[in-house]
Image (cartoon, grey):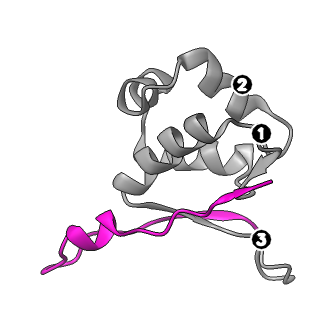
């Protein structure tokens, strides 16, 4: 099992769900990941250890909902974050299908 996947923190998972106003149950239904697993992810003190399968299910669900995870850039002005990308007029949703997904960090 990969040790850390793309360095998304538990706070970022909670923030993404809050932005979308989704309950744990709704995220579970959309992602196919159990509520108990999602609760463990969100309650972890930092970067939750996830299997590649769980990571991809949860992160892809958020990406499909226009959530983007921002890395900690090491500057004093920023840290890990979450961004909601509002759809714009003329946006082609096919662009979202070609979204980059960070590979697992072994």
- The residue sitting at 22% across, 77% down in the picture is 88
User: Image height check: is 65 above or below 40?
Assistant: below
Where is residue 64? Give x, y as percent. 35, 53
Figure quadrant of the N terminus: top right
Which mark, by number, is residue 72?
3
Under tag 1, what secondary structure? loop
Under tag 3, what secondary structure? loop
Mark 2 vs mark 1, CA separation in Å: 8 Å
Q: Are marks 1 and 3 in contact (CB under 8 Å)?
A: no
Q: Which residue position holds label 1?
A: 48
Q: Is residue 80 magenta?
A: yes
Mark 2 vs mark 3, CA separation in Å: 22 Å
User: Which numbered disc flags the more N-terminal residue, 2 or 3?
Assistant: 2
- The residue sitting at 37% across, 60% down in the picture is 66
Is 33 or 44 nearer to us in this picture?
33
Q: Are marks 2 and 1 in contact (CB under 8 Å)?
A: yes
Relative side of 82 to 62, left or right: right
Query: Label 1: few (<14), some or many (≥20) within 10 Å?
Result: many
Relative side of 94 to 100, left or right: left
- The residue sitting at 42% across, 35% down in the picture is 22
Query: Label 3: few (<14), some or many (≥20) within 10 Å?
Result: some
By secondary structure, the bulk of the magenta-drawn segment is best described as: loop
Is 61 or 51 nearer to us in this picture?
51
Specify the quadrant of the image occupied by residue 53.
Answer: top right
Q: Which residue position holds label 2?
A: 40
User: Which numbered disc flags the more N-terminal residue, 1 or 3?
Assistant: 1
* Residue span colored magenta: 79-106
Mark 1 vs mark 3, CA separation in Å: 16 Å
User: Image height check: is 44 above or below 28?
Assistant: below
């Amino acid at each position: 099992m990969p040790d850390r996947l793309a360095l998304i923190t538990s706070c970022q998972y909670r923030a993404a769900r809050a932005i979308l106003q989704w309950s744990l149950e709704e995220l579970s239904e959309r992602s196919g990941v159990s509520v108990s697993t999602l609760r463990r992810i969100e309650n972890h003190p930092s970067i939750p250890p996830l299997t590649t399968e769980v990571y991809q299910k949860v992160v892809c669900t958020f990406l499909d909902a226009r959530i983007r995870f921002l890395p900690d850039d090491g500057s004093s002005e920023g840290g890990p974050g979450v961004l909601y990308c509002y759809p714009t007029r003329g946006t082609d949703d096919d662009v979202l299908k070609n979204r980059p997904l960070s590979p697992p960090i072994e």
